[in-house]
Image (cartoon, rainbow, N blue to C red):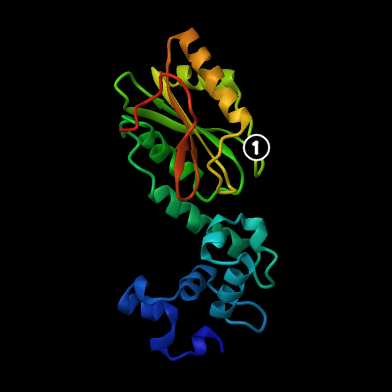
């Protein structure tokens, strides 16, 4: 049955307006984003197929637009709307840009909105002034599902051009593992040396997953208390 053929009290849009978004099931909320169904299926049915294709709602939120095109009835416009909606949610969850870094957990928190839900590894630098106020958060590199480059010179240059006096680094592991690789440990040591050379303070390097974070061991880093 097409959504518009349902009784008005059963239509997702009308129910949302009457009772709020919390009253709708996941497939109904997604149907509103899709706007219409496909050949022979309603928007709600298409939404169910899209969620099933990705595995669950969390995987759908992490999926890139081109992955959604594999579902019959989902064209570029629908895929782009869904991907854009989830990206807006991630941005809305970002903390104020002028947050202050006082411990390693603050670095993980500041970088998390740029790392959560990403299918590829990203490296984020959090640039601070001398008192720890965040001046800038930016993605330095993006690589594959299990590796991204960590160019020490580019990272230091980014901090200097941003007017920073200190910086922290964070990267995600899409696999969910919090174990640092040998390359993670090596680049952390190199960043200590490079920061000392140019008079910057290297705060910490952390691994961030969608549910947790972990420091990469090193000397003279932030206290986590």
Comparing 83 with 182, the one in front is 182
- The N terminus lies in quadrant: bottom right
Which residue corresponds to the image point at 66% horizontal and 59% vertical from the top-left? 67
Give residue 190's position: percent from left, percent from top.
56, 18
Question: Looking at the picture, does residue 165 appear above or below residue 100?
Answer: above
Comparing 204 with 167, the one in front is 204
Q: Quadrant of residue 53?
A: bottom right
**Do we see residue 164 in this rendering?**
no
Which residue corresponds to the image point at 53% horizontal and 79% vertical from the top-left? 44
Give residue 161's position: percent from left, percent from top.
47, 18
Q: Which residue is mark 1?
A: 147
Q: Quadrant of residue 74?
A: bottom right
Residue 38 relative to residue 211: left or right:
right
- The C terminus lies in quadrant: top left
Question: Looking at the picture, does residue 137 appear above or below residue 47?
Answer: above
**Do we see residue 223 in this rendering?**
yes
Q: Quadrant of residue 173?
A: top right
Residue 67 relative to residue 99: left or right:
right
Give residue 95's position: percent from left, percent from top.
35, 42
């Amino acid at each position: 049955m097409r959504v518009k053929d349902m009784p008005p009290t059963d239509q997702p849009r009308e129910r949302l307006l009457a009772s709020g978004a919390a009253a709708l099931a996941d497939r109904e909320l997604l149907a509103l984003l899709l706007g219409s169904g496909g050949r022979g299926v309603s928007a709600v049915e298409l939404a169910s197929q899209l969620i099933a294709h990705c595995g669950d709602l969390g995987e759908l939120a992490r999926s890139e637009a081109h992955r959604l095109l594999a579902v019959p009835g989902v064209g570029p416009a629908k895929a782009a709307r869904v991907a854009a909606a989830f990206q807006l949610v991630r941005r809305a969850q970002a903390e104020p840009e002028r947050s202050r870094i006082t411990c390693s957990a603050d670095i993980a928190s500041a970088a998390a909105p740029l790392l959560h839900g990403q299918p590829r590894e990203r490296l984020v630098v959090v640039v601070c002034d001398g008192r720890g106020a965040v001046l800038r958060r930016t993605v330095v590199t993006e690589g594959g599902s299990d590796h991204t480059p960590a160019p020490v010179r580019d990272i230091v240059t980014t901090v200097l051009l941003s007017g920073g006096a200190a910086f922290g680094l964070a990267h995600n592991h899409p696999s969910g593992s919090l174990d640092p690789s040998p390359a993670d440990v090596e680049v952390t040591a190199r960043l200590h040396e490079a920061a000392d050379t140019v008079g910057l303070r290297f705060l910490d390097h952390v691994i961030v997953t969608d549910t947790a974070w972990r420091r990469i061991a090193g000397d003279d880093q932030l206290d986590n208390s």
